[in-house]
Image: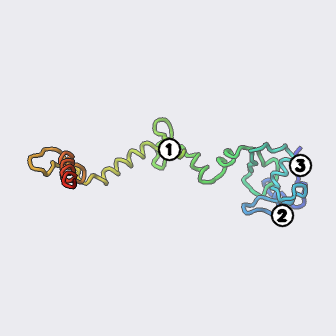
Amino acid sequence: MLHATPPDPMLVVDDSGCWLWLGTSQQKGYGMRWDPAAKRMVYLHRVNYEHFVAAIPDGYQIDHLCKTPPCCNPAHLEVVTPRENTLRGDAPSARQARQTHCKNGHPFAGENLRITPGGRRACRTCASEYQREYRKTHERKYPDPSPCIAEGCDEIRYRGDRRCLKHIAADRRARDDAET
């Protein structure tokens, strides 16, 4: 049975029913105390949960339903997976996981959803628009096909060269023959 009042004089009850720990706390505000049996500092919310409710299974965490780190009231605590605990929070990863649409309003669903090799979600519509814009601003050096400069050749010249592949290869053969 859960106590209506905290069993420790270092705990005070606030208006929302939280048992706030007044003793030592770690950087994020979670209450801590020395456990002589374990010979180390332990999180008070975990100790209280295990004392008043049940053991915490391996691989699970305690989530503060009240979102108050110094709270040790077992009625405000719940055992959850690390993933569930993260998703319930307000960290960037949790906010992003709750997103249903990209920043341009396209849904993260169906054919529009792409999972990147890194495991992130990507919007196919935005990626297509980006590619279209990129191609417009990064046109090839010679956007219109120009003929080879060799006399009488109608072949299209190769990339940044002024000659076609046939004449480039012929020039290489002639150069190689001259070297031998």
Tell me which residue sits at (15%, 49%) in the image. 148
Secondary structure, mark 2, is: loop
What residue sits 12% from the left and 50% below the top?
150
Give, as a three-letter code, the residue at label 3.
Answer: His
Q: Please give the residue where the numbered disc 2 appears in the rendered image.
A: 23
At a point 85% along the width and 44% down the height, the residue shown is 53
Q: Position of residue 3 (x, y in %)?
A: 89, 49
- Mark 3 or 1: in front is 1
Mark in the foreground, 3 or 2: 2
The residue at the far front in this view is 180
**Front position in the image: 29 or 118:** 118
Q: Amino acid at mark 2?
A: Gly
Residue carrying label 3: 3
Label 1: few (<14), some or many (≥20) within 10 Å?
few
Residue position for label 1: 116
Q: Residues within 10 Å of mark 3 (few under 14, many from 20)?
A: few
